[in-house]
Image (tube, rainbow, N blue to C red):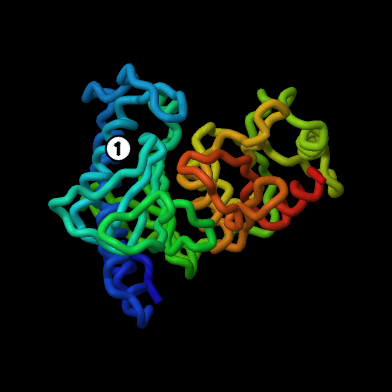
């Protein structure tokens, strides 16, 4: 059992030793992601001083303006993991096509998908942002992976996690057995175990949703959120909390309970969040911590994606609260 003060490297290797079939490839990949996050964190902390704020003038595949830090984070993640020999391909929220491994590097048995910097609209106003990642085993054979290797349901993930760059920087991950959080000690440049075996409360006192979109929702969803705003059976009131960065809103919900919602709309029922880069890895973590995640009808982890940038509604958090939302939506 890992103890407080355990470094992330030690924790990863302890998990590896506890798994008889482990080869060390996943451990190496997770370490490389952790290294990339430290570099990104350094740039985020200096953003206002290093001409890293603002947009590049480009538009990404999502139709969103590319922030300078988005571009930097995407590049750093790719460079930190491409040479390790653990991956057959990658996919990024910022890149339209599959990212292949350069011919000069060996390839491996894993697929990495990531949102390099979640919360781009909050970058310039110094609000928490983050990195999200998901790892699958490849399905195809041959040197290079294919899009088919990425289009797997979330139940097939072998690891997922996120990094939150906030008042402190935390790396939260799971390889399927427990969810563990590590806080970066900037004085030594190392992540230390601070939140072992995170468990989400079955029910929470907060809800998180962008109320400004209320008029765009279907009637059952409007009625459900109105109920959340009203006094509960015991007379208590729920608190509304919304940051606008998925990583930050999910992190609070993971630790404190409640529900985070990014629903679809009447004219856009497919929602906004990306299944592969955001919803699926967060759902993996939520379930491993005792929570739940749904698109309003289906368990997120059961959805079979049909394209790299597929979108989905998301209801995620405490198991009882997510179940209540799904019932309310009919």
The residue most toward the left is 104
Image coordinates for residue 264, horizontal then vertical, percent: 66, 34
Residue sticking out furthest to the top: 57
Q: Is residue 66 left or right of residue 269?
A: left
Instruction: Give the residue at x 39% y 46%.
Output: 114
Quadrant position of the N terminus in the picture: bottom left
Q: Is residue 266 above or below residue 238?
A: above
Residue at position x 79%, y 39% in the image = 224
Is residue 21 placed above or below 240 in the rendered structure?
Answer: below
Residue furthest bottom as drawn: 20
Residue 37 as seen in the image, left or right of residue 179: left
Residue toward you, 288 or 97: 97
Q: Confirm whether residue 160 shows in the render.
A: yes
Residue occupied by mark 1: 73
The answer to whether residue 136 is above or below residue 253 is below
Tell me residue 103's x, y (percent). 17, 51
Q: Dot 1 lies on which element? A: helix
Q: Quadrant of the rendered structure where residue 230 is?
A: top right
Left or right, residue 224 beside residue 9: right
């Amino acid at each position: 059992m890992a103890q407080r003060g355990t470094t992330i490297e030690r924790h990863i290797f302890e998990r590896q030793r506890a798994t008889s079939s482990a080869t060390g490839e996943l451990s190496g990949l997770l370490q490389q992601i952790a290294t990339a996050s430290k570099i990104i964190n350094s740039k985020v902390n200096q953003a206002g001083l290093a001409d890293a704020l603002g947009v590049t003038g480009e538009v990404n595949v999502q139709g969103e303006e590319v922030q300078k830090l988005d571009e930097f984070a995407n590049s750093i993640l790719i460079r930190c993991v491409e040479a390790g020999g653990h991956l057959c391909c990658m996919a990024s929220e910022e890149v339209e096509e599959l990212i292949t491994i350069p011919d000069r590097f060996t390839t491996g048995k894993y697929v990495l998908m990531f949102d390099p910097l979640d919360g781009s609209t909050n970058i310039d106003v110094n609000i928490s942002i983050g990195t999200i990642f998901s790892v699958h085993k490849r399905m195809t054979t041959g040197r290079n992976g294919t899009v088919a290797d990425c289009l797997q349901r979330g139940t097939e993930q072998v690891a997922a996690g996120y990094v939150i760059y906030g008042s402190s920087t935390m790396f939260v991950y799971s390889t399927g057995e427990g969810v563990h959080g590590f806080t970066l000690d900037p004085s030594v440049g190392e992540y230390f175990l601070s939140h072992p075996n995170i468990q989400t409360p079955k029910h929470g006192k907060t809800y998180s949703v962008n109320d400004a979109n209320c008029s765009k929702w279907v009637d059952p969803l409007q009625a459900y959120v109105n109920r959340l705003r009203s006094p509960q059976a015991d007379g208590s009131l729920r608190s509304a909390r919304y940051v606008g960065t998925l990583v930050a809103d999910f992190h609070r919900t993971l630790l404190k309970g409640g529900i985070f919602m990014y629903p679809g709309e009447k004219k856009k029922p497919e929602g906004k969040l990306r299944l592969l880069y955001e919803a699926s890895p967060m759902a993996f973590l939520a379930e491993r911590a005792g929570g739940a995640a749904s698109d309003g009808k289906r368990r997120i982890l059961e959805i079979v994606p049909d394209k790299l940038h597929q979108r989905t509604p998301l209801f995620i958090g405490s198991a009882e609260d997510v179940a209540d939302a799904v019932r309310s939506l009919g």
